[in-house]
Image (cartoon, grey):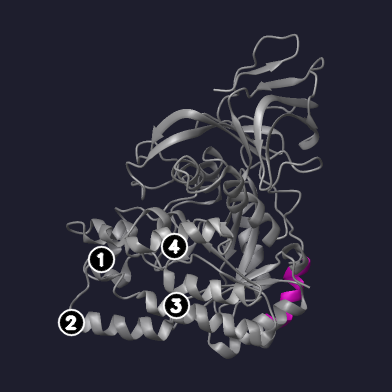
Amino acid sequence: MAPIRTARTKPVAAPAAGRPTGLPRYTLIRRGTIHTAADSFPADLLIEKGKIVQIGDVPPGPGMLIIDAKGLEIFPGGIDVHTHFELPFMGTVSADDFETGTVAAACGGTTAIVDFVIPGKGQRITEAAKAWHKKAAGKAVVDYGFHIALVEATPQVLADIPKVVADGITSFKCFMAYKGSLMIDDTQLLAVLAAARRHGALVSVHAENGDMLSWVMEQLVAAKKTSPRYHPVAHPALAEGEAAHRAIALAAMAEAPLYIVHLSCMEALDEVVAARMAGQPVFAETCPQYLLLDDRLYEKPGFEGAKWVMSPPLRHVSNQVPLWSGLREGFLQCVATDHCSFRFKGQKDMGKGNFLRIPNGIPAVGDRMNLLYSHGVRKGRLSPQQFAAITATNPARLFGMYPDKGTIAVGSDADLVLYDPKKTGVVSAKTTRHNVDYSAFEGFRLNGLPVLVLSRGEVIARDGDYVGGKGRGRYLARRPFDLAHWGYR
């Protein structure tokens, strides 16, 4: 654990959970090893009023709050750009709201999230955004922003795009799946891509061919194949690859950048690699579940496989090595979670007898950083710089938060996570901060854990416990998407 001291005083005890720390004017983090997306080096960090003001050899001064980080690794606070808190979905509401979800995020080293506003058909997207602001304000404990899902492309929706962009919502999502509810067609997607490009916004897509999925699901139901083991059968990798190919082609037609969420398989990765090699501005994320879990979990006895019902589903284990390689080689820019938690008892079991009624999603926002550090950095799959890039810097650059967020630099917010590489643990439902009754990563060993997490210079988590103030998170009005950050003209 990193001891906290003030100059000329005794050590300062951690504040009680739920109580604000009370920021001193200066906080000095000494003798740690700093890792950014570009470099690693030993240095001190001086923080004033929530901002980093000096990096280097900083002598202690009177009244400073001093954090001794000797032996610790300091990374930019994590940014998860794909969460679903308090989401009405499939006849229920996701179990984590903006309080429990962001507390879990903070304890796991994530200091900013971007959640998805999902409007109803016929609802103004400006009104949907207001509803999500109300959900988050006073509850979120880390800083937060919003994407908006566009479930239709009516003239009113397209006219409202510049209005929400002006409010700092500079990214949108379109579903190519969930036929009959969220799915839009190619003509609508083209209209959204073109409108977003005009107004400096980035469009993401859920890339699965909804017609293919619908057809396969009908065959399975007719054959009475409705247990959780048939969920991956209903979401074939071929359908994800086809949708990725088509979305990339439509983005090229609209001359717009594209971001593909929760990429899970080689079929989709191959499409992204080909597009990027051809110079097209296509970006993509994957998730810890696709890097570390596989479709054998659906074969668990009884109904237990329902715990991992998500879309896209877990894939064959052979996809994991290519996904890790995609991260190392820069073809995949981010690892997000698609956190959408449902309790196994009382929510997931709504689908007993028919996997199509199992609420889709897993809890992951509190596990992402630790899993990637332990099973990425410590196992040699990622360098510390790549870890910083995919968990913080690239998300910040893609979604209009850089350089305030996502890096360790003079002038940036002091959003930091301090890892002790010697500290070990195990992922467990008994210790999870998620508001659910199971862990999707039960039993995964962790070699290295965060001992301190700072948000805007305030210690908000210590040794896995939340110690920050209630509802302290601030809304992030994000800047427009800028291709110049990625070397495109």
Q: CA distance from mark 4 to mark 2?
A: 34 Å
Q: Which of label 3 and label 2 is nearer to you?
A: 3
Q: Residue at x 77, y 66 (%)?
A: 484
Q: Quadrant of the C terminus?
A: bottom right
Q: Is residue 50 above or below residue 477?
A: above
Measuring from the top left, give residue 270's x and y in whole percent.
48, 73
**Image position of 357 (left or right of 420):** left
Whole-number angstrom distance, CA of label 4 to CA of label 1 = 26 Å
Q: In what element is the residue under mark 2?
A: loop
- Mark 1 lies on a secondary structure that is helix
Asked if residue 207 shows in the view, the reply is: yes
Residue that badge 1 annotates: 228
At label 2, counting other C-alpha atoms closer than 10 Å, the crowd grade (few under 14, some 14-19, many 20 or more) is few
* Distance Cα–Cα, label 4 vs label 3: 14 Å
Query: Which residue is pictured at 25% across the width and 71% down the height?
Result: 230
Of 300 and 433, nearer the camera is 300
**Helix, strand or loop at disc 4?**
helix
Labels 4 and 1: the sequence-earlier one = 1
Q: Residue at x 74, y 66 (%)?
A: 487
Of the two numbered discs 3 and 1 on the same chain, state the one appearing first in sequence. 1
Q: Main secondary structure of the magenta part?
A: helix
Magenta span covers which residues?
157-166
- Residue 157 in the image: state x and y as whole percent: 66, 81
Q: Earlier in the sequence, mark 4 or mark 2?
A: 2
Front-lying residue, 334 or 306: 334
SS for dot 3: helix
Residue denoted by label 2 = 223
